[in-house]
Amino acid sequence: MEVENKKTTIKTKMHNPNQNVKVAKIGVILTEPDDWTASAFLKNIEKREAKALPINLSTLNASVSTSDFLIFDADLKDLELDAILVRDVGISFALEQISFKFDLLRQFENSNIPVLNSPTAIQNAANKFFSFYLFKLAHLPVPHTMVTSELEVALKTIEKFGSAVVKPIFGSQGKGIIKLESAQPESELASKLAALLKERGVLYLQEFVPNPGRDIRVFVVGGEALSAIYRVPRSGSFVSNLSQGATPVKCELTEEMEELAISATKAVGADFAGVDLIEGEEGLFLLEVNATPSGKGIKLACGIDVTERIVELLFERLEE
Ligand SMILES: Nc1ncnc2c1ncn2[C@@H]1O[C@H](COP(=O)(O)OP(=O)(O)O)[C@@H](O)[C@H]1O
Ligand SMILES: [Mg+2]
């Protein structure tokens, strides 16, 4: 119930209703305060009589000297947080900015306060190459994937796969994903791939998994699969992200879905995740683990607010 942190000893009010105790201050890392998941995190923290502080990492400053290390906000106030819940770190194409944001999270973690998900888990999951390596180590089924900077290798890979998807290694919300067919003229394939290579410097090619026109998003929190949705792409699209216009439909969890989603979440080291699965002809394949997932689709289709359980898990960590 008591949490030793560098600055102070706090007690969570929930378990000490009669005492005059310091209320836990939880930083919620976000970029869009109106986002459903961000608002639900803030609301569920406040419900537990803790203080929820929305924080956009872009607004934080750091001062380092021989005697001091300080992180402060735009009002020059020291943050003095007791825990951190990450909704989203924000997309940035500036390497130094994204690196600074993760380093801020790492130093919070280092100062002995719970950070959910951990920066390492978020980075593992966001990286579609490294996460596949971790899935392979954990013996989890993934579609055959090739990463190359050689145009010739890419062309041969597409010939082998027949149908392939090309996606960014650091991508989300179905952005930048295209499907290529080996039946297309080689000159057309070569020019598309060359353009992507120029933009990204590396190509991430994956065999297209023939599927029943939907994928599956399983929500895992604290080692438990809470719920799942099918995501049905809008007509004419194969990309089933809700942000691309797909529709969420309630999905009954099977044991295979649960096991795969829980193992994948564990493989990247996440405490909570939205795991994307796809139904291949011979069983399920893992597409990715999202360690900063939206809870909105599951709430809409199943009526389950996963953010409640995530906040509960955060308080369990705070009290450990
Ligand atoms: N190998 C694949 N075979 C079939 N469909 C795929 C494949 N990879 C991705 N998709 C479709 O594209 C969507 C987005 O892919 P995903 O790898 O989850 O990237 P993102 O991070 O952008 O969500 C998936 O949810 C799925 O509908
Ligand atoms: Mg996805």
Image: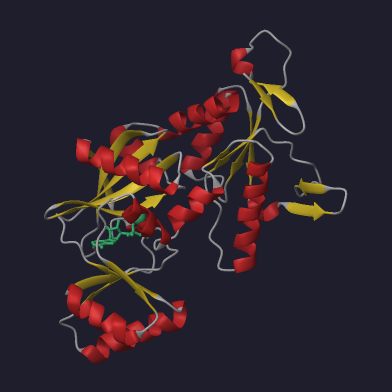
Q: Foreground residue, 39 or 209?
A: 209
Image quadrant where one finds the N terminus: top right
Q: Is residue 254 visible?
A: no
Q: Foreground residue, 10 or 160?
A: 160
Residue at left offset 24%, top offset 71%: 164
The spot of residue 255 in percent (x, y) is 21, 35
Total of numbered circles in the picture?
0
Which quarter of the frame holds ligand 1? bottom left
Quadrant in the rendering for residue 262: top left
Q: Foreground residue, 126 or 160?
A: 160
Residue at left offset 71%, top offset 51%: 60
Image quadrant where one finds the C terminus: top right
**What colouring does the structure picture have?**
secondary structure
* Left or right: 137 as drawn, with respect to 127: left
* Figure check: 307 above or below 61: above
The spot of residue 200 in percent (x, y) is 45, 77
* Figure check: 18 above or below 156: above
Q: Foreground residue, 190 or 73?
A: 190
Q: Is residue 90 visible?
A: yes
* Left or right: 251 as drawn, with respect to 310: left
* Figure check: 232 above or below 207: above
Residue at left offset 21%, top offset 40%: 256
Quadrant in the rendering for residue 174: bottom left
- Which residue ends up furthest to the left in the rendered image? 281
The spot of residue 296 in percent (x, y) is 39, 41
* Left or right: 60 as drawn, with respect to 168: right
* Figure check: 286 above or below 316: below
The spot of residue 37 in percent (x, y) is 47, 41
